[in-house]
Each structure stands twice: as C-alpha cells, then as structure tokens.
Image (cartoon, rainbow, N blue to C red):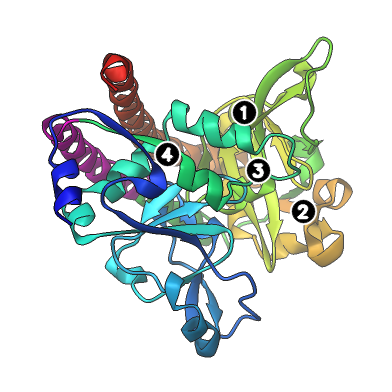
Amino acid sequence: MYEEDAQLASQDWSLHPLGELPGVDSVTYGIVTPGPHQPAGVPLLQAGDIVGGVVDQSTPRMIDAAVHRRHQRTSLIAGDLVVVLVGRIGDAAVVGVEQHGWNAARSVGVVRFTEAGQQHGISMWLKWWLKMPEARSRYLESSAGSAHSTLTISTLTQLPVPLPPLGFRTRLLRTMRLVERRMVLNTRIAACAMKLADAHFVRCVEENKEAPRPAAVIADVGEVVGGMRRSAAIEDGLPVAWAAPAEVLRHRLAHLDRTDQTTWAPPHAVCAPGTILVAPRPGGVETVVSRIPLVPGRGMLALRVERETDRMWLLHELRSRSKELVSTAQGQQGREMSRKAFSRFTVAWPDSAQVREPFARIAVPLHERANTALEENRVLEALITTEFTEMAEQTKGKR
C-alpha cells in the first residue's frame, strides 16, 4: 500500500503495463454464457451499451439472478472502468452509481481500482489513454487478421500506460473532468434539439391531417443505394469512412459524424454528407443523416436526396415510421434492408411550399444547433488528444 501511494504521488515519470499500473486492482472480462433474457433479472452490460464514453442505460439485457451470483468477480462497482473488447475495441466508460450491481458480458473488460487509484483518478486517466493513437495502434495491431476486431485481456493487461509526475497528471485530469462535463452538456443540447425537431414534425402532421395527403414512393424522391462490404485497397479507389449497421443502431442522435472503420471504394460509391442511412433492428428501423462522406455497410441502405427541404422531411418521416419500416427488412430475423422493398415504401409527401418548406425552416436550424454541439465535442476531444500526444513526446526521454 505504501509503495502504491508513493508511486501515485511521485514527481518522476514512469511507464507500466496496464495490469501493473499503480492504482489498478484487477483486470478481467465478463460472463461467457449469461443465458437467456430474464425481464425481472439483473442488468447485463454489453459492448453495445458503451456509447460515446458513457453507459447507455435505455434497454439493458437482463440475466437470471442466479447467474449473476455465480459471477461476482464482474459484479460492477461504481468507479470501475468498462472497456469494449469486441468491435469498437478500446472504447471505455466509468461505471456510475446507476450501474452499480450490474454484471458484464464477455465482450466487456472490467478494470477495478484500489482506493488510492480511485482517489488519484486512475480510472479517468485510463479511459482517455485508451483513446490515444499510441494506445489504439498497439491493440489494433494485436487484432490484425481477425474477422472481428478483438482486444484480449492479455493484450489489455500488457498495454503500456504512462504515468507522468503527480502535478502534471493532476492538471490534465482537471481539464479532462471539465471537458467531460461540457461534452455531456453538449450531448444533451443535441438530443433536445432533435426532440424539438421530431416534435415539430408531429405537430406539422397534426395541423395538416384534414388536408389531402399526397404520397410518394421513396424511389421517386431520392436515390436508394445498397450497402457494401469493407474492401482492401483497390485501383482508382480511395480510403473513406465505412459505416457498419451497428453504428447507426447504437447512435443516440440523428447525426452520424464519425465511424470506427474505413474502406476503399471508387468515388461513385461514396455518399456525400447529408445522406440518410437506415438500418434494421428487431421491431423497427433506425434512421440517421450522415455528416461526413462515407460508404454504407452491408445490410443497411443509404438514401441520397438533393434538396435539403426534401431531406429534412424524409428524415423525420422515416424516423416517425420506424415500426412500419420493418416490412422493408429481409433475411434471417430481418437483419438486412431490402433495397427493392424500401424503394417501394410509400411516404407522406405534402405540398412543398405549404408544408415541407415551412417545416424545414424550423427543423434545419435545430439540426444545425445539434451539429454545432457535437462539433464542439469533437474539438474538445481533440484538445485532450493533443495534450496527451505532446505529453508523450516531451517525456519520452524521461522514461
């Protein structure tokens, strides 16, 4: 204990494997076989529940209490760091009091801290270090050649983690906490803006329900583009963001502004910013609009719409009809969008001058406000990344 306190309070630079970092108590993974969903059971944290550095509590899977009791080593404690081990490897969140007592799935690593580690903010330090290019390159390299990106507990435990002098670390942790508070606020602002836009759409539909309801099929108001598998380098191609269906499904807001992976694609296959993306889930279809050039992944569809007025109406029309759009999915358990069925889907298409344009005049600024908030989050995250990178460069000679 004394040695740990001394290392955490040291004014010297040090480098440690994550599993041996002062303040870390244990590193493990969750339940391999959790069993079927039990509505009255214990919440199970899965990799998909870790979104944007926080835990999404909306629809956790529930497991039998007896299974939970047999796996007490991963019964979560407030302050634990939970790390995605499959897919978006390295994404992490600190467990809050709301998730205290949950359990974790095999796809999630659980890092537990000593009392001294909690006091010195090692959980937040690790959460941000896992985002850094130096850390990501190491665990992505270990996953090269795998069908799915996978971070093993062995690799996570051996990941080198820098521990700078206490004074420097304390200042950077203070900045991290302020940045995270602002990012949470910005996310709330973006979510409220989207709720207002959705509510305005509902109101607009209600106000015009007595008027004639012109309709159109989707293929007549936009170009439907099928998804593609990821591809290695190709002739006359270029690297571009590749959006997997899971990224659309887990996105809590209507804007997709980043992806975890890239692909090579010919220029004509790249969808411009403003493209509507749709992906199926059990019981519904999720709809978002892209903010970056990208290629849609296999199983989902993209809808190119030229006029912003039309795009705004279609986006909210599709969001409001999520359950009806299930009829446009196909394959095992309806996990893929059918381009043919989706193209023939009928949407409300009221007069542009009387309905769609007035709606867009209010909806567009709300979307712009949401995007501004999300853009600030990207800048703030880049600020911390830059601080970490400069710190690593300045102190390499002191290790």
Closer mark to the observer between disc 4 and disc 2: 4
Q: Amino acid at mark 4?
A: Leu
Q: CA distance from mark 1 to mark 4?
A: 40 Å
Residue for point 30% across, 30% down: 380
Q: Quadrant of residue 323?
A: bottom right
Provide the secondary structure element on which disc 3 rests.
Answer: loop
Name the element at disc 2.
strand
What residue sits right under mark 1 in the picture? Answer: 307
- Residue at left 61%, top 80%? 37
Disc 4 versus disc 2: distance between alpha carbons?
A: 45 Å
For label 3, the residue is 149
Q: Are marks 1 and 2 in contact (CB under 8 Å)?
A: no
Residue 263 within the magenta-colored segment of the rendering: no
The residues tagged by marks 2 and 3 sit, at their Cα atoms, a distance apart of 38 Å
Single out the residue that lies furthest toward the top.
236
Q: Nearer the viewer, residue 132 or 293?
A: 132
Task: Give me the disc on residue 346.
Answer: 2
Amino acid type at image mark 2: Thr
Mark nearer the viewer, 3 or 1: 3
Can residue 120 be seen in this snapshot? no
Mark before the other along the chain sequence, 4 or 2:
4
Of labels 3 and 1, earlier in sequence is 3
User: Reading the chain from its start, which is encountered first: label 1 or label 4?
Assistant: 4
CA–CA distance in space, label 1 to label 2: 19 Å
Q: Secondary structure at mark 4?
A: loop
Q: Which is nearer the eye, 260 or 162?
A: 162
User: How far across and how far down the image is residue 132, in percent?
Assistant: 42, 30
